Each structure stands twice: as C-alpha cells, then as structure tokens.
Amino acid sequence: MSGVEFSRPFRIDTLGDGDRAVEIAAEPAERAALVERFGLVSLDALSATATLRREGEQVFAEGRIRADVAQACVATGEPVPSTVDEAFTLRFVPEGEGGEEEIELDAEDCDVVDYSGGSIDLGEAVAETMMLSLDPFPRSEGADAALREAGVLSEDEVVSGPFAALKALKDKLG
C-alpha cells in the first residue's frame, strides 16, 4: 500500500463478524496528490461513509462517496466543477481470487478489488471509484463555441464521411 496517496487500510482480522461503520476523509495533502495523479484541476473535498462486512477472506464495503472536484474542459481547458455524491458497493478479495475471465455484470453486482496481505485499502478504492464516476469528457459552457471556432463539426452538422454513416446508424437505431 506504499505510494498510495489516500490510504485507509483496514485489517481484515479486526473486522469481526458483524457490520462495521467507518468514515474516511482525505486531508489537503492527500487531495493535492490525487489532483496530480488523476490530472484534475482541483479536489476540494473527498470523503466516504461505509459499512464493512467480512465474509471469510472477502470483505464487502457498501456506502457513499462525496467529493467536490474540478476537471479541465476538453475543449477550452477551463475548470468544470462537479459534485460527486455516489453510492458504491465493493467486494475485496485476496489477490488472484478475483478471476481473470470476463463475466457480464448486472447492475446489482459490485466491483471487485484485489487485496494482498491482511488488509484492504478503502481509501484507494474510494479514490478510484470517485475518479470513475467523473465525466470522461467534461465540457464548459464555452466548449461548443470553442470547438466550432476550431472547425470541429457537431454531430448534427456531419453530412459525409465515416461519421455521417455512424450518425445515420445512430438515428436509425434511436
């Protein structure tokens, strides 16, 4: 777990048989390191509440992530603020037991996180889950104008070429 910006380890042998409620929050230095790692503009808050439950060597974590974050607009580079308030369900399994084969997941299935040694790292899992919940292509209010000025056509303006064929297929299916 060394080198992890937001590490909150929990030893599985101390979890007991019942549910254990936990709260974690990233300190300013941890948030600054996550900004660097994930290429964010800012991360003003990151916290989570969770219930941990051990079942043999597996640990289930169910809770809620909250974060105040800003990403760079893909067109202008301007900060695009957003708030994360997401429920999560994770299943921590000993390294190598998560399986390498692809399986199809239902909406109620949880993400699987490998752990090694005798502890899970809820902080790292929360940081990664927060990042996955963000818009991969954030756009500021001025994004469309900046793209038009750069000569990028909107989906509705495409009339020929491979993207026109994709648009026609999308219209047909939609």
Image: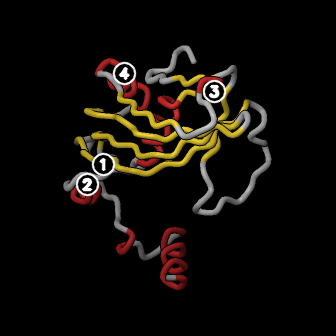
- Please tell me the numbered disc located at residue 75: 1
In three-dimensional space, the C-alpha distance between marks 3 and 4, rounded to whole angstroms, equals 24 Å
Asked whether the beta carbons under mark 4 and mark 2 sit within 8 Å of each other, the answer is no
Query: Local crowd at mark 1 within 10 Å, few (<14), some, or many (≥20)?
Result: some
- Relative vertical location of residue 4 with respect to residue 16 in this rendering, above or below: above
Residue 56 location in percent, x, y? 73, 36
- State which mark lies toward you, 4 or 2: 4
Q: Position of residue 53 (x, y in %)?
A: 59, 40
Q: How is the image coloured?
A: secondary structure
Write down the residue under mark 3: 12
Q: Are marks 1 and 3 in contact (CB under 8 Å)?
A: no
Label annotation for residue 30: 4
How far, Cα to Cα, is label 2 from label 3? 47 Å
Q: Which residue is mark 2?
A: 143
Q: From the viewer's side, name the closer residue of 166 and 124.
A: 124
User: Which residue extends farthest front?
Assistant: 17
Is the residue under label 3 in contact with that under label 2 (CB below 8 Å)?
no
Q: Earlier in the sequence, mark 4 or mark 2?
A: 4
Q: Residue at x 69, y 24 (%)?
A: 116
- Local secondary structure at mark 4: helix
Question: CB of mark 1 within 8 Å of CB of mark 2?
Answer: yes
Q: Which amino acid type is shown beneath numbered disc 1?
A: Ala
Residue at screen point 78% across, 37% down = 97
SS class of the residue under badge 3? helix
Residue 11 figure quarter: top right
Which of the two discs, 1 and 3, labels the residue nearer the N terminus? 3
